[in-house]
Image (cartoon, rainbow, N blue to C red):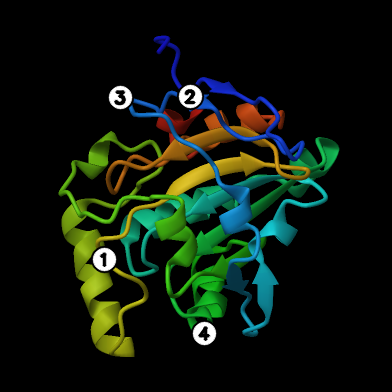
Amino acid sequence: MADDKDDIREPADEEGLKVVDELKMSRTEEPEYTVNFEKLRDKIVYDGMGNKVKFGDIYKMQKTIIVFVRHLLDFVTKDYVEDLGMIPLEYLQSSDVRLVVIGPAPYKFISDFKKETGFHYTFYCDPDRELYKELELGQEYEPTDVSKSKHVKQNSFMGVLRGMWKIMRVQEWQGDVKQQGGAFILGPGEVVHYIHIDKNQIDHAPINELLKRAGVQQVSFPKDPRVQEL
């Protein structure tokens, strides 16, 4: 394979659908990764009201940034989604790009999580993690140094403390703690533009990298100068 990171080639298959033939994951070499739309398109996610949505309908009509996050009590997830929520709507609209976040929790937690993070874009849940499994997103937890993330504002001690307090308050986990996430830019139709598979808790794709890959104007995060550097 070439040394270029996140390298994607998109040949058409026999049915005329574009698939990923070869992909270089970020930060390390990985084996070939194929997006099997046939197995993915009819998988179901849920909105905040419990309505079912086919995964294939999310990116069918529009180029879409789809971010799979960890459990909703994870302070890293909270900080990352807060920054995703700072992307101006006009930036996305001017490039005709949609932003969607998917979590591994029951849908009943969506409303409170969006209020807590200020995230006003589309949020779905995959409580049985069928998409996570089909996309081969990691399922092992690995302790990491959160200070290395460009999007985490809390320190580990306070972040974990707040998470444990929420668990005691709601008496229920909001997703599998071992489940890792990833980011995809798909569509319109079954076309892959970019993939990032998270290797650990903080290995999420930098938001400005996602925007650049999707052809969207990048965002300034004045409260955290680290984020301005890709």
Label 4 and label 1: CA atoms lie apart by 18 Å
Q: Is residue 125 left or right of residue 157?
A: right
Amino acid identity at mark 2: Asp
Label 4 and label 3: CA atoms lie apart by 36 Å
Can you tell which quarter of the image residue 76 is in? bottom left
- The tag earlier along the polypeptide, 2 or 3, is 2
- The tag earlier along the polypeptide, 2 or 1, is 2
Q: Which residue is mark 2?
A: 6
Q: Position of residue 213 (x, y in %)?
A: 62, 28
Q: Nearer the viewer, residue 213 or 115?
A: 213
Q: Position of residue 150 (x, y in %)?
A: 38, 36
Q: Nearer the viewer, residue 148 or 177?
A: 177
Is the C-beta separation of discs 4 and 3 under 8 Å?
Answer: no
Q: Position of residue 57 (x, y in %)?
A: 74, 60
Q: Which residue is mark 4?
A: 108
Q: Which residue is mark 1?
A: 177
Can you tell which quarter of the image residue 93 is in? top right
Closer to viewer: mark 1 or mark 3:
3
Crowding at dot 4, Cα within 10 Å, few <14 / some 14-19 / many 20+, comes out as some
